[in-house]
Image (cartoon, grey):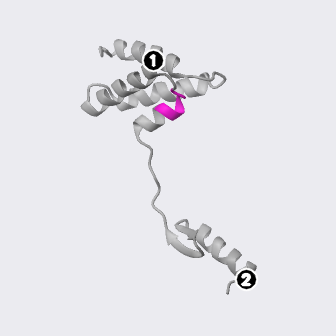
Amino acid sequence: MIDRRGALRLMCLGMATGVGVIVSGRIGTAAPEVATLRDRLEKGLKARLPEEFEFIDTVVTMVEAGSLPQTLVEKVFFYVRRTKSHKKYLVPYFEILLRQKASEEGIEIP
């Protein structure tokens, strides 16, 4: 039986190693989950309309095909998140700016 101090020691040990996670009273390792580009864009830009999801699908497909640089998409994503944080929905701003930046590099987004 583990008392409170023993449980606290186990939690501290897990935090100190950086890999321990208490699950059902046992210490185990947990693999970190990495969000996909699609998830980051949908959640980070607060997509809500079917047209917004379609645009994000187009962007992700172009990135996966190599016709649109992921670095460009991420730069625009972080810029919109940083400067338009007071807005509730960010996809329209992202779409306008991404189309503009992509056209400057000679890339057309359908």
Residue 14 percent across, percent down from the top left: 59, 71
Q: Which residues are magenta?
A: 42-47
Amino acid found under the numbered disc labelled 1? Glu
Q: Residue at x 62, y 23 (%)?
A: 88
Q: Is 87 rendered above or below residue 18?
A: above
Amino acid found under the numbered disc labelled 2? Asp
Q: Is 45 colored magenta in this rendering?
A: yes
Q: Quadrant of residue 55?
A: top left
Q: Is 26 colored magenta in this rendering?
A: no
Please identify, in this view, whether the residue under mark 2 or under mark 1 is nearer the observer.
2
Numbered label attached to residue 3: 2
Q: Is 19 rendered above or below residue 45?
A: below
Residue in the foreground of this view, choosing between 72 and 47: 47
Asked whether, in this view, residue 58 is left or right of residue 85, the answer is left
Q: Residue at x 26, y 30 (%)?
A: 66
Residue 104 percent across, percent down from the top left: 36, 12
Q: Earlier in the sequence, mark 2 or mark 1?
A: 2
Residue in the foreground of this view, choosing between 6 and 97: 6
Residue in the foreground of this view, choosing between 101 and 85: 85
Residue 77 percent across, percent down from the top left: 49, 27
Numbered label attached to residue 95: 1
The reply to whether callout 2 and callout 1 are in contact (CB within 8 Å) is no
Quadrant in which the N terminus is drawn: bottom right
Q: Residue at x 52, y 29 (%)?
A: 78
Q: CA distance from mark 2 to mark 1?
A: 55 Å
Classify mark 2: helix, strand or loop: loop
Asked whether, in this view, residue 40 is left or right of residue 3, the answer is left
